[in-house]
C-alpha cells in the first residue's frame, strides 16, 4: 500500500511537472518553454527566427554590412581620449555619423563623460552596477539580483549622466556569463531591447544574424545557462567569434592571443576577419574590445584607426550601434535605399555641468563620483540604492 501511495505520488508529480513547466509565474508574468521557431508565426518587425538568412529577402550585395564597435567597463578620464580620437568626425556612407556602443559599468565611471559620449551620438548600454568578479554570482543570478544590477542601473545611468532613460536599450553581462531565462525575462520586464552577451563559434561563416528569443534558438550555448523559455520582444545579438592566427576563437578581439604584432599584419588579420562577413551573408560584425587593449600597446590603437579608415572606403559598410542594427532588421532597407533617404539619429538636447562628489561606499570605502547632477547624493550609489538617496 505504502509503495502504491509513493508511486501514485510520483505519478501525480510527473503529471504536475509539464504543467509547471508550461506556465510558471514569476512576478505575475507568464513563463513558457520556447518551441522550435516557425517562420509563419514569427514575423518582423517583432519576431525573427535565429538563422543565417539575411532579413527582408535582400541580396547580400544590397545588404549593408554593419560593424558594431563596442567598449566595456568604466568610462573614465584615462580612456575617454581613445574614444574621442577614434570615433569623432567619422561618417557612414549615408553621411550620418558613426555610432559606437558603450557597455558601462558603474564603478569608477565618470558620468559627465558618459553624457559626452551620448551627446556625440554614441549608444550607452549597461554592464552592471557591481561588475562582481565571482562568475557564479552571474550564472546563478535571480531575477531580483538582475533587476538590481541592470534595471536599477538604467535609472542610475539616466539620472547621473543626464540621458534619456528610453535611450538605454542594451546590456552585456560581465565576463560574458549568461544567466539564462532570468537574464532575458529581466530585459523584457524592463523594456530593454537587446542583449549582446551570447557568443557563437558555430555560426561564424555564415554568420548568425540577431534574432528574437520568442522561439528556441539554434545558437550553441558556450557559457551556460542560455534561455529556454519563450521571451518575446527581446533581441539576442550574437557575439560572432573571431579566430586568431593559431585557430583559437575569441569573443572579444582583445581576447585573441595569437595576433600579429606589426601594424600591417594586424590590419590584414582584421580585414580577413571582417571579410568573413562582408563576402558572406553580411551578418553584423562586432569589433569588441576594452580600452585597456589600446593602453597596453600603442600599435594596436594605430591599427584600429587604420581599420576604421579602411571601412570608411567601403560604400556599403556602416558603423552603427546595437540598437541601430535591430532597428534596421525590423525594417530592412537596401544600401541604395539607405543612401537615398538617410535617417540619421536626432541629436540629444540634454546638457551636463560636471560635479565631483566625495562619497562613502557602503559605509567604509571612499569613492569619488563625477556626474551631471548638481546636488551630491547622500551616499555612493550602489545595489539597492541606485540614486544614493539612502
Ligand atoms: Zn567587464
Image (cartoon, rainbow, N blue to C red):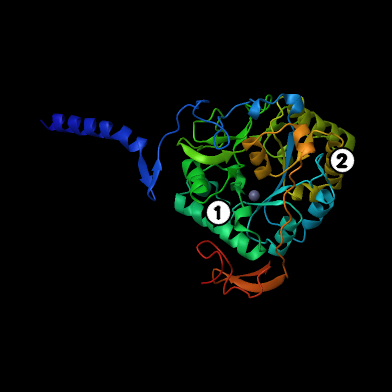
Residue neighbourhood size for the residue with mark 2, other residues' Cα within 10 Å, grouped as few (<14), some (14–19), many (≥20): few
Query: Nearest the camera: 276 or 241?
Result: 276
Image coords of residue 389 (percent x, y): 54, 71
- In this rendering, would 214 be left or right of 32? right
Crowd around label 1: few <14 · some 14–19 · many ≥20 (10 Å)? many
How far is the residue under mark 2 from the one under mark 1? Answer: 35 Å
Give the residue number, with chain letter if any, for mark 2. Answer: 309
Instruction: Give the x, y percent position of residue 46.
Output: 55, 37
Q: Which mark is residue 150?
A: 1
Q: Earlier in the sequence, mark 2 or mark 1?
A: 1
Residue at (73%, 47%) from the top-left corner? Answer: 100
Left or right, residue 126 beside residue 189: right
Give the residue drawn at x 57%, y 29%.
50
Vertical position of residue 212 compared to residue 296: above or below = above
State which quadrant residue 330 falls in.
top right
Q: Position of residue 177 (x, y in %)?
A: 57, 43
Question: Which residue is depicted at the point 49% across and 37% down?
Answer: 227
Of helix, strand and loop, which one carries label 1?
A: helix
* For the residues bearing labels 2 and 1, Cβ distance under 8 angstroms: no
Residue 238 at least partly seen: no
- Label 2: element kind: helix
Using the rendered image of the protein, determine whether residue 304 is visible from the camera's viewpoint: yes
In the picture, residue 163 is in which quadrant? bottom right
Q: Residue furthest front?
A: 341
Q: How many marks?
A: 2
Residue depicted at x 36% and y 36%? 21
Amino acid at each position: 500500500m505504502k509503495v502504491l501511495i509513493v508511486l501514485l505520488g510520483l505519478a501525480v508529480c510527473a503529471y504536475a511537472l509539464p504543467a509547471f513547466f508550461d506556465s510558471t509565474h514569476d512576478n505575475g508574468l507568464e513563463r513558457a518553454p520556447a518551441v522550435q521557431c516557425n517562420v509563419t508565426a514569427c514575423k518582423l518587425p517583432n519576431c525573427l527566427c535565429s538563422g543565417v538568412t539575411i532579413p527582408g529577402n535582400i541580396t547580400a550585395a544590397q545588404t549593408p554590412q554593419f560593424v558594431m564597435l563596442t567598449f566595456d567597463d568604466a568610462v573614465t578620464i584615462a580612456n575617454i581620449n581613445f574614444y574621442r580620437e577614434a570615433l569623432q568626425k567619422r561618417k557612414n556612407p549615408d553621411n550620418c555619423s558613426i555610432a559606437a556602443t558603450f557597455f558601462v559599468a558603474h564603478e569608477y565611471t565618470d558620468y559627465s563623460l558618459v553624457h559626452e559620449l551620448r551627446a556625440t551620438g554614441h549608444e550607452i548600454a549597461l554592464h552592471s552596477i557591481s561588475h562582481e568578479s565571482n562568475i557564479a554570482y552571474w550564472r546563478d543570478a535571480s531575477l531580483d539580483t538582475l533587476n538590481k544590477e541592470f534595471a536599477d542601473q538604467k535609472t542610475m545611468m539616466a539620472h547621473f549622466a543626464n540621458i534619456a532613460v528610453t535611450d538605454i536599450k542594451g546590456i552585456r553581462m560581465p565576463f560574458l556569463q549568461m544567466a539564462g531565462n532570468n537574464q532575458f525575462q529581466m530585459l523584457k520586464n524592463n523594456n530593454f531591447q537587446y542583449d549582446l552577451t551570447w557568443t557563437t563559434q558555430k555560426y561564424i561563416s555564415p554568420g548568425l544574424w540577431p534574432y528574437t528569443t520568442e522561439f528556441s534558438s539554434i545558437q550553441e550555448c558556450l557559457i551556460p545557462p542560455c534561455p529556454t523559455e519563450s521571451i518575446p520582444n527581446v533581441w539576442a545579438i550574437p557575439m560572432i567569434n573571431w579566430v586568431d592566427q593559431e585557430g583559437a576563437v575569441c569573443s572579444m578581439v582583445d581576447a585573441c592571443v595569437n595576433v600579429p604584432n606589426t601594424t600591417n599584419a594586424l590590419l590584414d588579420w582584421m580585414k580577413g576577419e571582417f571579410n568573413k562577413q562582408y563576402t558572406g551573408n553580411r551578418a553584423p560584425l562586432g569589433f569588441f574590445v576594452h580600452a585597456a587593449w589600446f593602453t597596453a600597446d600603442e600599435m594596436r590603437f594605430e591599427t584600429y584607426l587604420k581599420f576604421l579608415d579602411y571601412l570608411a572606403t567601403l560604400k556599403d559598410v556602416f558603423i552603427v550601434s546595437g540598437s541601430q542594427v535591430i532597428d534596421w532588421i525590423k525594417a530592412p532597407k537596401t544600401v541604395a535605399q539607405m543612401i537615398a533617404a538617410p535617417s540619421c539619429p536626432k541629436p540629444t538636447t540634454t546638457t551636463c555641468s560636471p560635479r565631483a562628489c566625495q562619497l562613502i561606499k557602503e559605509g567604509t570605502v571612499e569613492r569619488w563620483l563625477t556626474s551631471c547632477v548638481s546636488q551630491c547624493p547622500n551616499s555612493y550609489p550602489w545595489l539597492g540604492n541606485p540614486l544614493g538617496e539612502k
